[in-house]
Image (cartoon, rainbow, N blue to C red):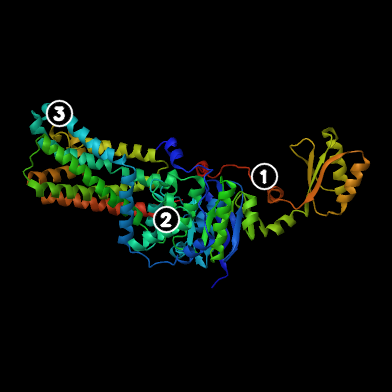
Amino acid sequence: MTELAIETIGLAKTFGATRAVDGVDLQVRRGRIHGFLGPNGAGKTTTIRMLATLLRPDAGSAQVFGHDVVREADEVRSRISLTGQFASLDEDLTGIENLVLLSRLLGYSRPAARNRAEELLAAFGLTDAATRQVKKYSGGMRRRIDIAASIVVTPELIFLDEPTTGLDPRSRNQVWDIVRALVAGGTTVLLTTQYLDEADQLAEQISVIDNGRVIAEGTPGELKASVGSGALLVRVQRPEQRPAARGLLERVLAVPVRDEADPAALTATVDDPGPVARALTELDRAGIGLAQFSLGQPSLDEVFLALTGHAATSSDDAEPADLQESSR
Amino acid sequence: MTATDARQQAPSPRQPLEQISGEALQSVLLAGARPPRPGPLSVSATFGWRAMLRIKHVPEQLFDVTAFPVLMTLMFTYLFGGALAGSVDRYVQFFLPGILVQTVVMITMYTGVALNTDITKGVFDRIKSLPIWRPSALVGALLGDVVRFTIASAIVILLGLALGFRPDGGVLGVLAGVALLLVFSFSLGWLWTLLGLVLRTPNSVMNTSMMALFPLTFASNIYVDPETMPGWLQAVVDVNPVAHLVTAIRGLMEGNGDMGDILLVLVESAVLVAVFGTLTMRRYNRRA
């Protein structure tokens, strides 16, 4: 039995003149939550559609549990499940009808399908909504029925697409609990998200994709370390002193210092925390009063910015806009 | 459904969420062992059941099936019956098998529209990622449509009987005619599934289907005897499969069904499935 749930080598897909996926090498270990991070249009969706046998790769290869996604598509299909924008439910049908339908398609007998649907609805706290049309579900209920539909038969690999986008904190925690329960049961999770917070919370391993290529890989900790040991934030008391403070910090720390939107704030990524103390003394000696001074681990947002040169939330809309439908 | 309906039915955000227990989750995950893989027939039937559920939840789609044939039959019979055949009564004998074909052939196009809607909404991706017999979703949808076609046929025939349609072929002749119509419509459905897969929006599927269907149904022997048409148009009618279908059904309903006519329709149906079924499945399997 192979250790890897997903292995791709040089996976590529071109739409017209756009190389949506441009040689992706990905290794996802069995039984893990693997974060797949990138802005809209980075190639996340296209990669996953190829892994899920919905799209044929133009070049390279992809294997899911050792089965080729093109030649052994059926073997792959019997091991995976899709959620979110990758695979929708029939919104005109009720929750229970959707689950019975999927159970029947997956081989349950009529009574067994009914039982399975009821069992899933109960476990996901949706019993009261069973006979309501899915289009009338709230955002949080929608995510839960989505995931319930994906585990009618417990998959070996589940593609979770932005499972908590647009959810309130409480529903978000519920979804996170569900994801953790899945993994505890042995399922491998490939989690695509733009929420770095989410990847940070859940994923043991992260691949960052941009412009169709994997540009960084590692644990959340490794990724943070790779862009410097810390994020320095300085706020001066008098905004007019900011340029002077920036010049001084750049000289002492020998790294670029960025102006923030806040007219008094400056940030920098420092590799070596050593000179930071010296910078603090120098600022004081130059008569620049500080309102705030902090050195912390960089957030994944900062990691993303450092890796790609643009923020994680920026969008070039290469993926269809209608996939970003509102969640409620 | 309007937005207001949705708001009234959805629970208010302040209402406490139902508790999800980790234990219950673990137990449903453990219970999720894969049953034996279902056969092609069972899966197709399940998709047919889905089509029935959709009729239950979106009854508007039956409006086309019911209102359209009633309107067309009444309009043509009373507006043009006198002019075309001397009397309403005589015209309805000629016209009813024709309008039956027109009605059902026209509503076949909703097969493509429904398929395209599934694709646009992402429902199709879930279906395609399941380990099931590949054509089952399409076969099931077309089987569901046969139910809609049967309803429409029943409406047109009952209305015809009320208007004075008295077929010499009797009950058997009429049923045989409807059966032939269902076979042809199921086969023609594969043309629309192909369009449903190729075109981008449900609307463009609808428009393209209309453009194909209008000439097919009007340049035929549905409304008038082609002998009154110019020669070039008669030539068109002669090769129009819809006209062949009307001829065969008229024969069956009048009690003098011609084996050659029927066979021609069956061959044309087989060709439709062979050509458009194959193209549909090829497109289905490699769709981006």
Q: Nearer the viewer, residue B282 or A324?
A: A324
Determine the residue positioned at 84% across, 32% down. A240
Mark 2 element type: helix
Where does residue A51 sit, x and y in percent of width and height?
A: 51, 58
Labels 1 and 2 touching (C-beta < 8 A)? no
Determine the residue positioned at 24% across, 38% down. B66
For label 2, the crowd category at 10 Å Cα-Cα, with few meaning under 14, some 14 to 19 and many 20 or more, is many
Q: Amino acid at mark 2?
A: Lys
Distance between the Cα atoms at labels 3 and 2?
48 Å
For label 3, the crowd category at 10 Å Cα-Cα, with few meaning under 14, some 14 to 19 and many 20 or more, is some
Q: Are labels 1 and 3 on one chain?
A: no
- Horizontal side of residue A177 vs B91, given as left or right: right
Determine if residue A251 is in view.
Answer: yes
Numbered tag placed on residue A311 in the rendering: 1
Q: Nearer the viewer, residue B204 or B23?
A: B23
Q: Which residue is mark 3?
A: B78
Mark 1 element type: loop
Chain to which the residue tagged by mark 3 belongs: B
Labels 1 and 3 touching (C-beta < 8 A)? no
Chain to which the residue tagged by mark 2 belongs: B
Q: Which residue is mark 2?
A: B128
Q: Amino acid at mark 3?
A: Tyr
Q: Amino acid at mark 1?
A: Ala
- Which residue extends farthest right? A285
Determine if residue A53 is in view.
Answer: no
Q: Quadrant of residue A117?
A: bottom left
Distance between the Cα atoms at labels 1 and 3?
69 Å
Q: Are labels 3 and 2 on one chain?
A: yes
Numbered tag placed on residue A228 in the rendering: none
Figure check: A77 above or below B235: below
